[in-house]
Amino acid sequence: GNTQFRRLVGVKRSTFEIMITGLKPSWRKKQSRGRSSPKLSLQNSLLLTLSYWRDYASIAKTGINFKVSETTAYRIIVWTENELLKLKCFHLPGKNSLYKNTYELVKMDVSECPIERPKRNSKGRRRNRQKHYYSGKKKRHSIKAQVIVEKGKILATYFANGKKHDFRMFKESKLPLPASTIAEVDLGYQGIKRYHKNSNLPHKKTKKIPLTREQKIQNKKQASSRVEVEHIFASLKRFKIISQKYRNRRRRFGLRFNLIAAIHNLEWDVKLRKNSSLVTNQC
């Protein structure tokens, strides 16, 4: 059934069909240029990529499951990711949407993905890269991903090394938030009101000044509203490639995170419209 398919692959069957429809033209071009016929069909190639994201086994093991070599499996994954990125329906709205649209409320939060310990020194590159990626919060090396959400949909992302603070990431991302837009954030964004006055921060408790009952009620209401971001992170982390320790090259992490975020947006649009054909036409 549809539920079992999503548990195994990570996406709904309707989303899988949309992805197949979008990839067909580039698959035909690939077949016309190729000297030999591809070892896997388009459906199996997409299944291979999604299963790699979902289970995050080694590429060699993923290739064995689909009866292809490790090199062939790697080429299929890279080709599928690059072609999906060319489709319009797998693009995030981005910062431009904040210019064009006046959102009443947006929510921001940061998630961390653990990575393998970088090499300490490398010629011609940054020295002490271990310190550069070490997160004092998680006590391990990581990559941070900042996400901006509006009504269950991801608008834009920003990536940084694990050492950077959440508020510093916000300043470096230079988000064009209109003055009328309310930004709901957590205590990791202390100081945001200097840059965006219309921001909702939870009240902070100190040793000498405990929270009043009204402040606790306000914090609870804000937490129940902002929990939407946590639910989206949980949805994205169905794919173990961004929840477990990331073993690939870090330069491709943002591409994969954005593709998975775009899949979430696509399924959210289908859920709201209750018709996948409308979304398919956008690809």
Image (tube, grey):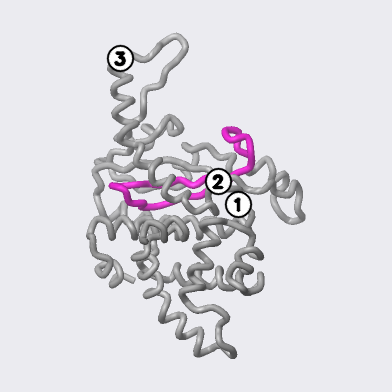
Asked whether 119 or 74 is in front, the reply is 74
How far, Cα to Cα, is label 3 from label 1?
Answer: 43 Å
Disc 2 marks a residue whose amino acid type is Cys
**Residue 70 screen position, x and y as percent:** 66, 70
Q: Residues within 10 Å of mark 3 (few under 14, many from 20)?
A: few
Secondary structure under the numbered disc 2 in the rendered image: strand
How far across and how far down the image is residue 277, in percent? 26, 70
Quadrant of the frame with the C terminus: bottom left
Please report whichever mark, 2 or 3, sits nearer to the chain's N-terminal start. Answer: 2
Q: Secondary structure at mark 1?
A: loop
Q: Which residue is mark 3?
A: 213
- The residue at which mark 1 appears reads as 246
Q: Which residue is mark 2?
A: 113
Task: Please say if the residues under marks 2 and 3 sit with CB atoms less than 8 Å apart.
Answer: no
Residue range corresponding to the magenta coloring:
134-159
Tell me whether circle 1 and circle 2 mark residues in contact (CB < 8 Å).
Answer: yes
Picture quadrant where residue 61 is located: bottom right
Q: Give the main secondary structure of the magenta stretch.
A: strand
Q: Is residue 147 magenta?
A: yes
